[in-house]
Image (cartoon, rainbow, N blue to C red):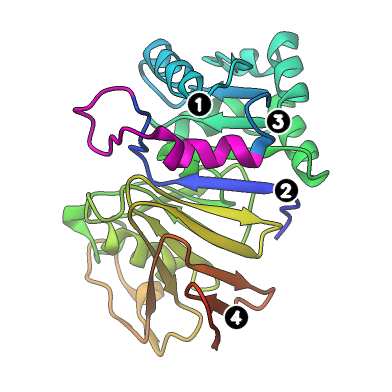
Amino acid sequence: MNLQGTLIPIGGNENKGIKKGEKYHTENIEDGILYRVVMESGGKDSKIVVVPTASSIPDEVSANYKSAFSKLGCENISFADIRTREDSENPENLKLVSEADCVWFSGGNQSEIIRKIKDTKFHQIIEARNNENKLVIAGTSAGAMCMSQRMIKGGSSKESFIKGAVKMGSGMGFIQGVIIDSHFIQRGRFGRTAEACARYPELLGIGLAENTGLVIKNAHTFEVIGSGMVILFDATELRNNNHTILKAGEPISLTNLKTHILARRDMFRMDSENKFQFQHMQTPVMYR
């Protein structure tokens, strides 16, 4: 894994404190995920750059995050309005990301982030500053899924456990060794994450529920934040995996796919051999 800084992937629909009707609204946004993002970024005076590239309604998304972060006392909120690859080379956007304490990728379509930002100067600056431990990279839904080297591009939950139901591609590569899925519980994505792990059993599958995320430090320390669950898929000791011999459309068979269910304040560490050390509030337990 190449991460040196802090990565915060979120499963979508995080509490923004905008209206009482929103699904995960609480009166105290200070108790939520966005507050943790602000604190990890350096506090209320940190410079946060929102990148709404994945969204089909970037202006509305930008306004929502402006309001949400303002409720937390943050005034240094900027927007890198990247709608074409040319925008990722725009000096104004490059200046924003060069000076940011946190870059926040919104939800939407993760493939749009790849198409418009991957391998551009904007992307290169983020990677360089991340490697210097000078940047927090946060993202929700599509903004979380794009972070890994191998990325889920799409796939119907109704066709889960069928070879070819999951579409994979290259992500932004901010972290290696994992595959990230979002809206995991609410949209029934167990099957598509399982197929992704069948294709890449050396990678850890991470399913993030809504209003739930991870604070990842230096690519090996993971802390669960938010109100929901994080499901981990460990395929490193599969005893049967017929994915490689199947034709597209045939059902997948997996045995000994290990799963772990974690919630707020649970932590785990992962070493270079994908061995885990879990900590459930108090006592650490080694697991192979």
Residue in view at x 50 percent, y 23 percent: 69
What's the CA distance linking mark 4 and mark 3?
31 Å
Residue 276 location (% of width, % of height): 57, 78
Image position of 116 with respect to 182: above or below: above
Residue furthest left as drawn: 158
Which label is found at residue 101?
A: 3
Quadrant in the picture for residue 253? bottom left
Which label is found at residue 275?
A: 4
What's the CA distance linking mark 1 and mark 4?
37 Å
Q: From the image, which quarter does the C terminus lie in?
A: bottom right
Q: Nearer the viewer, mark 2 or mark 4?
A: 2
What's the CA distance linking mark 2 and mark 1?
23 Å
Q: Are circles 2 and 1 on residues that touch, CB within 8 Å?
A: no
Segment tinted magenta in the rendering: 18-40
Q: Earlier in the sequence, mark 2 or mark 1?
A: 2
Does residue 211 show up magenta in the picture? no
Q: Earlier in the sequence, mark 2 or mark 4?
A: 2
